[in-house]
Amino acid sequence: MMKTFRIAFAALLAALTVTVPASAELSEGVRAPIFSTRAALAGEEYGFSLRGALRRGPVVLYFYPKAFTSGCTLEANAFAEAMPQFEAAGATVIGMSNDDIATLKRFSREECRDAFPVGVATPRLMTAYDVGSGSGYARRTSYVIGQDGQIKMVYSNSDYRDHVARTLAAVRALSK
């Protein structure tokens, strides 16, 4: 009887501590949260402003978990290779993680190949974009934000491989 009670109590306790995840990302059509953050491009630190970037054209804002991990490195390499196409479409690309600025300076040179910036995604920013994983890392989520400040496309998938193709297609569709 006591063993049955302990098993039932353990099951109840487990059920009470299970958390239901929040939505995976912000929805298309909503206004993107405006932010400024510390960023790095070609190993140099600077201040990135979403508002300022939107004045020049659409913005691809992609969140990734951690610099110098295999998937994040491969994703950064893929965005770097595609930068001529993003630039031809008038888009700014910025990668975002919760890494410190010293790490991002190195990552911007070594893996982003000086082609695009990476910025510090604070916990508050990850919450605003609903990309927090609960572990302090961002979920791999890409947004395309139109010049009007609205989210035009969102793609959330832990596999890095389709993020570049999907965001580039969305940016190109905006210019049509």
Image (cartoon, rainbow, N blue to C red):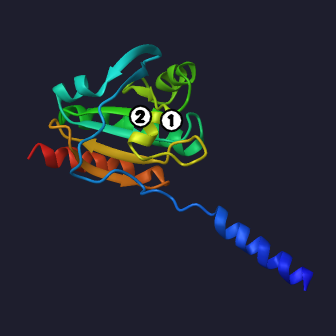
> Left or right of 8: which side holds 119?
left
Q: Residue placed farthest to the left in the image?
A: 176
The circle on residue 7 is none
Instruction: Quickly name the residue at label 1.
Output: 123
Q: Is residue 34 above or below residue 19?
A: above
Mark 1 is on which residue type? Answer: Pro
Q: Residue at x 23, y 22 (%)?
A: 52
Mark sitting on residue 95: 2
Q: Is residue 47 above or below residue 14?
A: above
Local SS, label 2: strand
The residue at 38%/49% (across/down) is: 163
Front residue of 76/15: it is 15
Q: Position of residue 29 (x, y in %)?
A: 21, 51
Where residue 151 appears, x then y in whole percent? 24, 46
The residue sitting at 17% across, 31% down in the picture is: 57
Q: Is residue 119 or residue 7 the one in the foreground?
A: 7
| Image-quadrant location for residue 41 | top left
Identify the mark nearer the N-term, 2 or 1: 2
How busy is the neighbourhood of tag 1: few (under 14 within 10 Å), some, or many (20 plus)?
Answer: some
Write down the quadrant of residue 126 in the picture. Answer: top left
